Image (tube, helix red, strand yellow):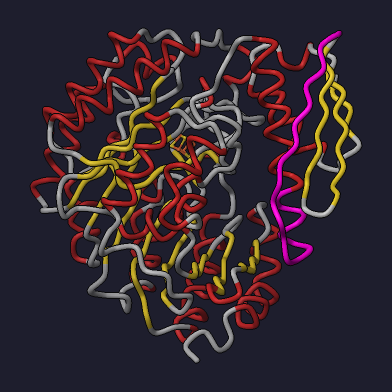
């Protein structure tokens, strides 16, 4: 159990939860600040740990930031000393370590390793990503990426925690597409500096073709930029749908194996085989698309050697991007309660293997994010062949551009780089509420993005 007088209970609980069995510890935390000196005291059973950190601040926001940072660090150090465990990302719990590192200027490596106790391997991964993003990373709030959410899939993967419905059971598909097309049309005048278009949120190509055509038609005005569609499931891909994507200006598709092990695919509720992934990949290549493949380390029942086979088969295909995810079991996923977690060390071995094999094959890590409840407290990393970075992923992860998002559960973001702040507007998750609320959504987004080009 954790008690704290700091007012940062949720943040400190995240630190406790990093550790296997952390929740079983009795942790008492107290803190105070005097003239830029932050005092923290942590008691665990009969052991007491005290830290004193000096950090002058000039604003209340800065003070709060340091207060929280030193409280988290003191707790991390104390629990680490008691359990003998260290974490790959040290006391970092946020989802954007690369963005955080950018904010530290030239001292970013030592900030990660010395201040936040990140392992040298993970800190150098961050540095490699910053290097790879050179020429793509551009802080400009009037830059825009455009997202369209189609939250339907042919079946539900057992690890899924997205708000995605099985398409065969969806009752209001046509009404949804009507609303989406109206929202896209209403968004066109909000910006001029478009960086990329991304259609995802599920498996967009599972829409009946006539409806998919209407969505792509509404997006046809956005030409000449990187344009990704999550083709996702290879069992949904055929010549007609790929030709439709090509004719609509799509430049990049995701063909996601997750695993090249058929037993695993069955276990996680994917209705396709590894061979279908390869066929889908070759078909998509024949249309000239750039291709991303998602794989997942730590899937139930998989050992490091199974994952190594997945990496080898993905590499044999040579996609432009490979995104290595670490299994993340959030509330809402069917697997959450039923799965026997692999030991953290085995998942770390998989992730390390992927990094060394992909690097050896000429891929570089180019974006990264973390989530709560990730196996081994690891990360998701996107790798790219030279010159094939996905701009959308960089902009979204580093929050350097505004994001105009359409559809149910879509979250639009206006980035104000000079003021170091972001404003968000989230549409309702539920399809029926989204359709009913569309006029309000359009009005709220008009307000959020007013003057974007000014
Ligand atoms: S394809 Fe993606 S969004 Fe669809 S069910 Fe599987 S994990 Fe969820």
Q: Judge from the rendering whether residue 338 lies leftward or rightward of residue 54; answer left or right.
A: left
Residue at 66% x, 80% y: name it.
443
Going by the picture, which residue comes out furthest to the bottom?
454
Check if residue 262 falls in the magenta segment: no
Q: Quadrant of residue 274?
A: top left
Residue found 45% across the figure and 79% down from its top: 142
| Marker count (numbered) | 0
Q: Residue at x 25, y 64 (%)?
A: 135
Image side of residue 388 versus residue 236, left or right = left
Q: Nearer the viewer, residue 93 or 77?
A: 77
Using the image as rendered, state which of residue 222 and residue 359 is in the foreground: 359
Whole-percent x and y of residue 426? 65, 61
Q: Is residue 56 magenta?
A: yes
Q: Which region is colored magenta?
A: 46-66
- Compared across the picture, whether 298 is left or right of 449 comes to left
Q: Residue at x 85, y 15 (%)?
A: 26
State which quarter of the image contains the N terminus. top right
Q: Residue 7: x, y in percent? A: 87, 43
Q: Which of 25 and 220 is in front in this view?
A: 25
- Which residue is at the front of the view, 188 or 134? 134
Q: In this view, does 8 lie above or below 221?
A: above
Residue 437: quarter of image: bottom right
Above or below, 448 relative to 300: below
Q: Position of residue 448 (x, y in %)?
A: 63, 78
| Residue 219: percent from left, percent from top | 36, 71
């Amino acid at each position: 159990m954790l008690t704290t007088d700091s007012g940062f209970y949720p943040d400190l609980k995240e630190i406790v939860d990093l550790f296997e069995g952390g929740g079983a510890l009795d942790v008492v935390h107290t803190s105070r600040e005097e003239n830029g000196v932050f005092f923290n005291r942590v008691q665990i059973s009969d052991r007491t740990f005290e830290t004193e950190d000096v950090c002058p601040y000039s604003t209340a926001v800065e003070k709060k930031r340091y207060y929280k940072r030193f409280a988290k660090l003191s707790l991390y150090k104390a629990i680490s000393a008691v359990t003998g465990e260290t974490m790959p990302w040290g006391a970092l719990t946020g989802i954007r370590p690369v963005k955080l590192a950018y904010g530290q200027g030239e001292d970013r490596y030592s900030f990660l390793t010395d201040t936040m106790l990140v392992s040298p391997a993970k800190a150098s991964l961050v540095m490699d990503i910053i290097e790879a993003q050179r020429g793509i990373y551009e802080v400009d709030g009037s830059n825009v990426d455009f997202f369209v959410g189609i939250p339907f899939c042919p079946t539900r993967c057992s690890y899924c925690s997205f708000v995605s419905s099985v398409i065969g059971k969806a009752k209001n598909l046509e009404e949804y597409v009507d609303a989406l097309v109206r929202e896209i049309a209403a968004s066109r005048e909000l910006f001029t500096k478009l960086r990329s278009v991304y259609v995802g949120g599920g498996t967009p190509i599972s829409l009946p073709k006539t409806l998919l055509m209407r969505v792509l038609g509404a997006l046809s005005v956005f030409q000449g930029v990187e344009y990704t569609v999550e083709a996702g499931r290879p069992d949904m891909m055929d010549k007609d749908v790929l030709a439709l994507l090509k004719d609509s200006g799509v430049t990049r598709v995701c063909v996601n194996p997750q695993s090249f092990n058929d037993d695993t695919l069955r276990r996680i509720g994917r209705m396709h085989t590894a061979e279908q992934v390869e066929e889908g990949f070759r078909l998509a290549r024949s249309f000239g698309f750039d291709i991303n493949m998602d794989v997942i380390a730590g899937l139930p029942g998989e050992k490091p050697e199974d994952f190594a086979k997945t990496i080898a088969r993905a590499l044999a295909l040579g996609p432009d991007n490979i995104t290595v995810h670490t299994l993340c079991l959030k509330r809402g996923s069917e697997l959450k309660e039923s799965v026997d977690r692999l030991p953290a060390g085995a998942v770390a071995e998989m992730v390390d293997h992927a990094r060394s094999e992909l690097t050896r094959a000429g891929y570089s890590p180019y974006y990264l994010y973390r989530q709560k409840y990730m196996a081994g407290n690891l990360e998701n990393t996107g790798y790219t062949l030279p010159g094939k970075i996905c701009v959308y992923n960089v902009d979204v992860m580093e929050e350097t551009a505004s994001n105009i998002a359409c559809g149910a559960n879509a979250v639009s973001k206006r980035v104000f780089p000079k003021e170091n702040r972001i404003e968000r507007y989230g549409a309702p998750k539920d399809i029926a509420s989204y359709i009913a609320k569309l006029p309000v959504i359009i009005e709220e987004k008009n307000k959020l993005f007013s003057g974007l080009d000014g």
